[in-house]
Amino acid sequence: MKKFFKEILFTLIIVFIISNIINFLRIKNPNINIKNILHRSPNIIYFWGDWCPICKLESSQIKQISKNLKVIKIAVNSKKQRDSINDNGRLAKLFSVKAYPTIYYVVNNKIVYTDIGFTSIFSIKIKYFIFNILF
């Protein structure tokens, strides 16, 4: 039984690593001067909507991440703003956001990676740490 759980854990780790490599190669990050558009230098740009069930699940994690990293939250077509920018989708179009939630990882005012869908706190922290080393 113990061996079975180790194999499942190992398989999940491999799938996680492979999916992130594929995501890194597949998604083309927008070439945008972030500081000129947002007038700030964030570490993370988070696009979400109050109508999005996955965004609602992820909101507490983003709040926790905001304690350690500079996060700009952008609410898209949402009634509730909850400390977010709400511009009725203008920035989402500019950043080419196709699905929600979308997280852009920013290093030196350049987007280096994009996560689409639910992402764990652990994954966000690890990715941001790695991207700061690589870029």
Image (spheres, rainbow, N blue to C red):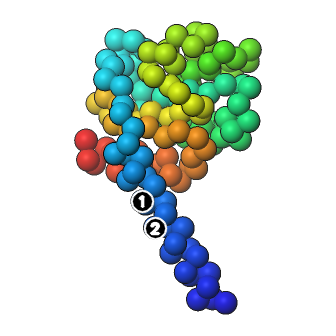
Q: Residue at x 44, y 21 (%)?
A: 95
Cα–Cα span, label 1 and label 2: 6 Å
Q: Give the quarter of the figure containing the N terminus.
A: bottom right
The part of the image, by quadrant, that contains residue 67 is top right
Q: Amino acid at mark 1?
A: Ile
Q: Secondary structure at mark 2?
A: helix
Q: Amino acid at mark 2?
A: Ile
Q: Residue at x 49, y 46 (%)?
A: 124
Q: CB atoms at circles 1 and 2 under 8 Å apart?
A: yes
Residue 82 visible in this rendered orientation of the protein: yes
Q: Secondary structure at mark 1?
A: helix
Q: Is residue 19 left or right of residue 132?
A: right
Q: Residue at x 36, y 31 (%)?
A: 29
Q: Residue at x 34, y 36 (%)?
A: 112
Q: Is residue 84 left or right of residue 18?
A: right
| Location of residue 40 with respect to 126 vertically, above or below | above
Q: Give the quarter of the figure containing the C terminus.
A: top left
Where residue 65 appears, as percent x and y from the top left, is 55, 40
Disc number for residue 66:
none
Q: Is residue 5 left or right of residue 128?
A: right
Name the residue beneath numbered marker 1.
Answer: 18
Name the residue beneath numbered marker 2.
Answer: 14
Q: Residues within 10 Å of mark 1 (few under 14, many from 20)?
A: few
Where residue 18 appears, as percent x and y from the top left, is 42, 59
Where residue 91 appears, as percent x and y from the top left, is 49, 15
Q: Residues within 10 Å of mark 2 (few under 14, many from 20)?
A: few
Where residue 54 appears, as percent x and y from the top left, is 69, 39
Of residues 70 and 34, the one nearer the viewer is 34
